[in-house]
Image: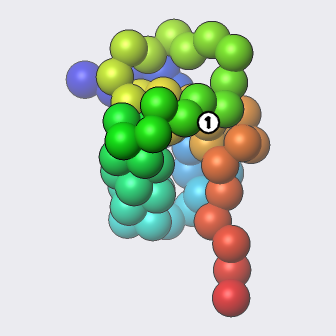
Amino acid sequence: MLLYPSIDKLNEKIPSTYSLIILASKRAHEMQMFDDHQLESYKSVKPVGQALEEVVADKLTIREK
């Protein structure tokens, strides 16, 4: 169950839930492969939760073409 960050905060940053899921899953995979973290501390233990925290902290966004 997703508790933090809330879906409301996530949808403020990225309005498309589908895009949010794709972004978080790709970032989580990248974090596992390269041990690459952008924040000092995370509340989440799992990479997907950490990726979502990066979205809320404006460290991770989708670039429009």
Q: Is residue 18 above or below residue 3?
A: below
Q: Amino acid at mark 1?
A: Glu
Q: At 57% from the left edge and 61% from the top edge, which residue is drawn?
A: 15
For the residue labelled by badge 1, is the local secondary structure a helix, a strand or a loop?
Answer: helix
Quadrant of res 58 = top right
- The residue closer to the viewer here, 42 or 37, is 37
The N terminus, quarter of image: top left
- The residue closer to the viewer here, 55 or 34, is 34
Task: Give the side of residue 18 with respect to residue 5, left or right.
Answer: left
Q: Is residue 42 above or below residue 10?
A: above
The residue identified by callout 1 is 54
Task: Give the side of residue 6 with respect to residue 65, left or right.
Answer: left
Q: At 60% from the left edge and 58% from the top edge, which residue is drawn?
A: 14
- Rendered location of residue 36, percent (x, y): 55, 35
Q: At 66% from the left edge and 32% from the top edge, which residue is drawn?
A: 38
> What crowding class fits label 1: few (fewer than 14 Cα within 10 Å), some (14-19), or many (20 or more)?
many
